Amino acid sequence: MFGCTYRNRFLQTFILFCCFLCLFTVAVVPTLAQQQDSTKTIRLQEFVITASRLKENISQSPVSVEKVTLETIKQSAAPSFFDALENTKGVQMLTPSLGFRVINTRGFANTTNVRFAQLVDGMDNQAPHLGAPIANALGPNDLDIESVEIIPGVASALYGMNAINGLANFVTKDPFAYGGLSLQQKLGFNRAGTAGGAKPFYETSLRWAYTIHPKLAFKVNATYLGGNDWVANDLSDLNPNANVSTGLTGIDNPAFDPVNAYGNESPNRRTLLLNGKNYVVARTGYQEQDVIDYGLRNVKGDVSLAYAPNSETRLSYIYRFADLDNVYQRANRFRLDRYQLQQHGISYSGKTLQLKAYLNLENTGNSYNARSMAENIDKTFKSDNEWFTAYGTNFTNALSDGATVADAHRLARGITDAGRPQPGTYEFQQMIDQLGDINNWDYGAALRVKSRMVHAEGQLNITKEFLPSFSRSTRLEVLMGADHRTYVIIPDGNYFINPEEPGKNLLYNKTGMFLQVSRYAFQEKVKLGATMRIDKNEYFQLTWNPRFTMVYTPVYSHNIRFSFQTGYRFPSVFEAFSNVNSGGVKRVGGLPVMSSGIFESAYNRPSIDAFQTAVNKDVNTAGLTTDEAIVNNKDLLRKNDYTYIQPERINSLEVGYRSDWLNGDLQVDIDFYYNRYEQLIAQVEMNVPKTDNPDSIPFYLYDRSKQDRYRMWTNSKTIATTSGPVWA
């Protein structure tokens, strides 16, 4: 099935879906009218709503779902409810910084986990241009959280978009049920790695809820968090073999590229022919702690108003706000400074109908890119051409004065860097302030993105609304829903541009709908479910996401579940539309509107690196001229074989068992899952020579100044799988 064409996939999926639905029409339920055994002791169970968008017993959920209750959160020794989620079965927590943690389950992830959705009362709290949340910056505080429901697996059939690794829904406290004023103060210390020893880490939270009238209530939450992040000071060399053919390694390597130092990466290096040998030389750069303030601050709050005309109906408005200073990690490290997120949301919940609409606003404030900051401080001091020319001259002079090769490189760097801005000085801080306000990473470091996300959705329980008696007699339940999402990006000329209509906002739309059918059968021992979802993005074909489930309950409190489902993930805004100049390398979105012509003309970066290394080796060890070495090694170059971006796809199979033993004193929960990923979205580096002459291409690809360098968003050609048992 995995090798089928798109049309055949759709046909097979549609036939399978129709066959599965037939089970609902032929299943016989002969004992529906029978009285349940009144002597059976019914133990109170936890209920969840996230797995099926319907309230249901967690034991009979058709897919694995984990619920973290208020009681569990109170008993946790973690600093916050968000940190406590790391102890939940099947949950992995990534920690790029002290103030930025990332939830993931059952799949591939990075520090911007666009494959995992994070909701607050059903509303996505992501930063629009990233397509993922910034930890819990815009979420609830500890005083307002009631529970967390986590689907540790594919949730695309019901939620679409970016839920192929899983989904977490933070459920907050009802102002009608939880009234009064609450205050919470936390204080701790962490040894951040800076001078002065341990630093204070503190958080102050407030919650106030009040019932104005039996039908009207409000709540207010506010949190202030402050502290100091850990210092990133790993100085391991990422480029240790650059000069191995000359014997210059370790501390003698003139292309030294520490992990947490910037301005000495690949775009900041050149190959210099010095004294008959080719040496790879990098600019000096600065350590991360020289250009980043590690202070943490997160001010957030929300205000909501709830109107409940009756026990089954609720109309609510919510406004959330967050302002934060933090260290944020993607491919580069960023200093977030006065970064702001907002959310306006309105929701209606009735017996059979639910509606939501919300607007997310993002403003990156005074944030900047640490790598661009470091390399452009160097370039402001001396241009690359000026610096490398001076370096070569100073190296030659040092050799003439009797220095060894290794010492000549050190002397050349020291003399060439004379007068360079030094960290901690007033001049250095002035440059950080100046470059941090220049929104062009070829000259400055500013991150100036403003974006919005508008989302509207609704779902209707068809059987309860139109066929209540039929639903009760047949135990059939039909739920349908639809949603629409539009991303609005304001082009800033550096991070985003509008290639088709310059000056106008970028719009990126997605519309989807689903139909879910469930039914009890075979004396209520079996619960069958089928869901079909379709999604349409303007840049891609229609996608179909089916889910088929079965829960078998042979005896009370013992439940075996089976599910098969597929999922798609459309590229995020950044993956689709980015257009970033970053140190001479342009990171370009994978849509044809952004990258037309690049894929067709490019050569893969790894083959270029291997080619350049081989040329240098032949010059340094075999006595060839540079031109001879280029001709000798040109066959190492490989033309790019990647192309324009497509949605990711996953096929997921899950089997699980949940039960209570020893009169409920022992709970057993076991899952086995198998995920198969196709077309994983990733970045590939490729360079385009500035010539069309086939004979000249190898010579252009040896000279960094004669090629355009790109980091392109595309799809992996590898079929990836994840699998394993999970138990608790």
Image (cartoon, helix red, strand yellow):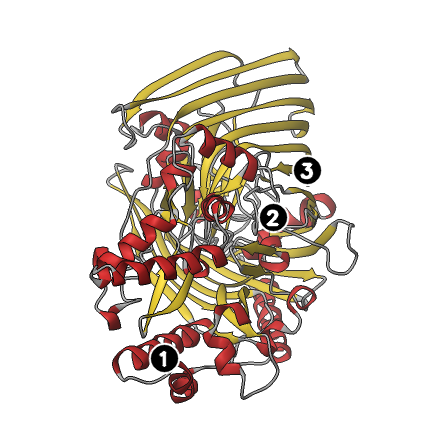
Residue 570: x, y in percent?
60, 60
**In this rendering, the label closer to the viewer, 1 or 2:** 1
Q: Is residue 137 left or right of residue 473?
A: left
Q: Which amino acid is tagged 3?
A: Tyr
Residue at 44% x, 55% y is 387
Q: Which amino acid is tagged 2?
A: Asn
Q: Pick the residue in front: 418 or 233.
A: 418
Q: Earlier in the sequence, mark 3 or mark 2?
A: 3
Q: Earlier in the sequence, mark 3 or mark 1?
A: 3
Helix, strand or loop at mark 1:
helix
Q: Which residue is mark 2?
A: 440
Residue at 69% x, 61% y is 536
Which of the labelled discs sits on residue 358, or is there none? 3
Q: CA distance from mark 3 to mark 1?
A: 57 Å
Helix, strand or loop at mark 3:
strand
Instruction: Report whether residue 574 is seen.
Output: yes
Residue 146: x, y in percent?
47, 28
